[in-house]
Image (tube, rainbow, N blue to C red):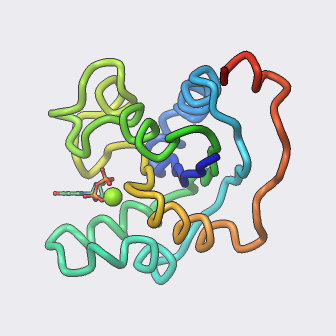
Amino acid sequence: MEQTFIMIKPDGVQRGLVGEIISRFEKKGFSLRGLKLISVDSAFAEKHYADLSAKPFFNGLVEYIISGPVVAMVWDGKNVVKIGRTIIGATNPADSAPGTIRGDFAVDIGRNVIHGSDSVESARKEIALWFPEGVTEWQSSLRPWIYE
Ligand code: UDP
Ligand code: MG
């Protein structure tokens, strides 16, 4: 099975969207492997978004991510990286379809509520960065009801 890194950004935490967002991943059939509420500093946020360091919005993005606690999670399931991105919706909420998290709960690109890894390789790096202690191995008893 595949794993992805999902983070509820500070606006999602402040707006009380944690339960709703976790619920969408749970109801889809994915399994939670790691979960923590954590505040990060700018050096950590810069590391997480290192690929975007040349972008004009980079400093604002780092300020946004360190502005309050975030919920860091690891989810497990078949094609969870790609399907996770679909559940989240397009980067700019103006283009995110209704029914997606950003489409339903966000307006501005710089306050788009949630992060999800964009590839299996990014997921591997992000999980290692956010969960150096490792994640929890377990198997949901619902598995045969979700996978044929
Ligand atoms: N972002 C922004 N302005 C932009 C593009 C991106 O503020 O013009 C922020 C936004 O919060 C986005 C994050 O930077 O979620 C990371 O950008 P990326 O292109 O990786 O989008 P994502 O993978 O989050 O959809
Ligand atoms: Mg990205």
Q: Quadrant of residue 29?
A: top right
Q: Quadrant of residue 131?
A: bottom right
Going by the image, does 134 lie left or right of 112?
right
Going by the image, does 71 lie left or right of 12?
right
Viewer-nearest residue: 57 or 35: 35
Report x, y in % for residue 11: 43, 45
Where 17 sits versus 27, above or below? Answer: below
Q: Quadrant of the C terminus?
A: top right
Where 81 sits versus 46, above or below? Answer: above
Report x, y in % for residue 25: 57, 30
Callout count: 0
Ligand 2 falls in quadrant: bottom left
| Residue at image location 35% in from the left, 19% down from the top | 99
Viewer-nearest residue: 76 or 126: 76
| Residue at image location 62% in from the left, 72% down from the top | 128
Viewer-nearest residue: 103 or 119: 119
| Residue at image location 70% in from the left, 41% down from the top | 32
Report x, y in % for residue 3: 60, 51
Going by the image, does 68 lie left or right of 38?
left
Report x, y in % for residue 34: 72, 51
| Residue at image location 25% in from the left, 39% down from the top | 90
Q: Quadrant of residue 60?
A: bottom left
Where 55 sits versus 74, above or below? Answer: below
Where 147 sits versus 37, above or below? Answer: above
